[in-house]
Amino acid sequence: MRAISMVLEAYKQKRNFGQTPEPRPHVAASYRKPIFVVQEHHASRLHYDFRLEADGVLKSWAVPKRPTVDPAIKRLAARVEDHPLAYADFSGTIPAGQYGAGVVKIWDRGTYENMLASKPHAQTITDGIAAGHLEVTLHGRKLKGGFALIRMQQERGKKDNWLLIKMKDKQARPGSADGNTQTAAKVSQSARARTATQRPSRSRLSASSRPAVSSRPEQSRPRAVKFTHEDKMMFPEAGITKRDVLHFYERIAARLLPHLRDRPVTLERLPEGLDGKAAPHFWQKNTPSYYPQWIPRAGLFSETGKSVQYAVVNDRETLLYLVNQGALTFHVWFSRVQNLDRPDFVLFDLDPGEASFAEVVTVAKQLHSILEAEKIAAFVKTSGKSGLHVLTPWEQAGGYDEARGWALHVAQRVIAELPDIATVERRKDKRRRRVYVDVMQNARGHHVVPPYVLRVVPQATVSIPLEWQELIPKLDPRQFNLRTIFRRLARQKTDPFTPLVKLYHKTGSRK
């Protein structure tokens, strides 16, 4: 009993029980079956308090957005102090001036089961919290089935942040972000059956390294993509909503798709936008089984032997579906599914580090001069962040190793001409304010941002193709962003990267 009182000391210290109607931190009898409760808390900012009974208290997390039964949506959950069991029945108004002032009401409650208790290495809820991983089955009115709580990488001095994730089971409702299974259950049985059929065939990488891309049956042609949560703020600093992002990709699709076509894609997803460091930010390679069947997949094996179903973005509907799922940036392979062992372009990634952008321009021009002297076409674009990308078609014999070796040789020629401002040194502490000419990304399985994609930076910048004559020292890559890009494109007569796209078909088809 005394141990529980000590655990609740943080709860006690934050509250004046002569002022707040919240229950005092006394010890209460445990429930016959462990319970969970979710309380809707209208404090300075609306959030949802998710609580699990364990060891005589309520283990608690503050969830800024309403819990969801959609496995594709991950909710941030900040670990907070343990609460007394009596708090499971609390609803009421915490008065102004008190900790957590505002209205509290019960949003959902029920019993739960600890899924990790039946594993070979059984864990209690307290063990799982210490390990940073919980799996529970909830039996609530709104939240049903399996849920996972996973601790995010913790920074010193920061909150103990977790992700609350609905697991894929028969209670999951893809596309239902409101977390209410009663509402989600209105989806017809036929719709659920259709979703069940929209699972990819698990094509595998053949010996010749040409994976099968899942076919698109007649009944699974792309449908109109329904946009959701369009008012969600994705780039708060720039005031850009999800609606703005969807509209951007809808308008840019004709220019972007040729650079995505037939390439395995890694998605950089921020479902909640750039909402501070705590917002979920992850890279997605594997395409979930509940994504529509009409999204093509390229089945590849990872280095560990695990099958990975990469999305292949060949049409506008696929592009917009993925953007609606929170994908902000698309990263593509250097090769296409027709011949994954042979890149069809080579990348020189010019990273300024602590150097100036004017020095990046100088290095890019020197690189262009060397390639031009060899009669090799070269194309330049902003990376969308602080550097430049120079691309050239790979027209020589060989695959990735040969392409990377050639690129390193060219980079060394640049450095021989500009030793004071350019380097191929990979270690940052040895670059000494020089521009890093990175060619090591030219490797099978690595990826690069194509032109015309948004970058995950507060200004919502865009990786944009440039004409070589535009490359001047005072150029500011930040000027190319979601707000300005279409004014620029309206003035352009031609796309600077169109010749490169045409060369893809010539070089990429070689074996």
Image (tube, rainbow, N blue to C red):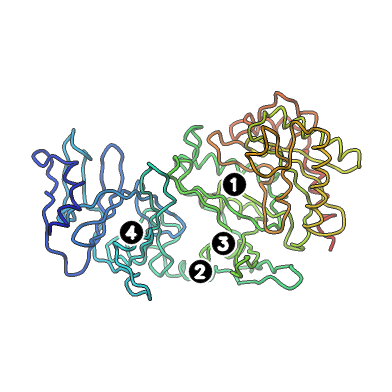
**Quarter of the image with the C terminus in it:** bottom right
Q: Earlier in the sequence, mark 2 or mark 4?
A: 4
Q: Is residue 83 left or right of residue 481?
A: left
Q: Is residue 50 left or right of residue 223?
A: left
Q: Earlier in the sequence, mark 2 or mark 1?
A: 2
Gap in Å between the C-alphas at discs 3 and 2?
18 Å
Q: Position of residue 34 (x, y in %)?
A: 22, 66
Describe the element under mark 1 as helix, strand or loop: strand
Gap in Å between the C-alphas at discs 4 and 3?
29 Å
Residues at circles 2 and 4 in contact by the CB criterion of under 8 Å:
no
> Few, some or many C-alpha atoms within 10 Å of disc 1 (few <14, some 14-19, many ≥20)?
many
Q: Amino acid at mark 4?
A: Ile
Name the residue: 30% across, 51% down.
61
Taking the view exactly as shown, the residue that stands out farthest to the front is: 430
> Which residue is labeled 2 in the image?
194
> Which residue is labeled 4 in the image?
129
Q: Amino acid at mark 2?
A: Arg
Gap in Å between the C-alphas at discs 1 and 4?
33 Å
Q: How many marks?
A: 4
Name the residue: 34% across, 48% down.
78
Q: Earlier in the sequence, mark 3 or mark 2?
A: 2
Q: Amino acid at mark 1?
A: Thr
> Few, some or many C-alpha atoms within 10 Å of disc 2 (few <14, some 14-19, many ≥20)?
some
Q: Mark on residue 329?
A: 1
Q: Earlier in the sequence, mark 4 or mark 3?
A: 4
Taking the view exactly as shown, the residue that stands out farthest to the left is: 18
> Which residue is labeled 3 in the image?
287
Q: Is residue 279 above or below residue 225?
A: above
Q: Is residue 26 above or below residue 300?
A: above
Which of the two marks, 1 or 4, is nearer to us in this view?
Answer: 4
Name the residue: 76% across, 41% down.
390
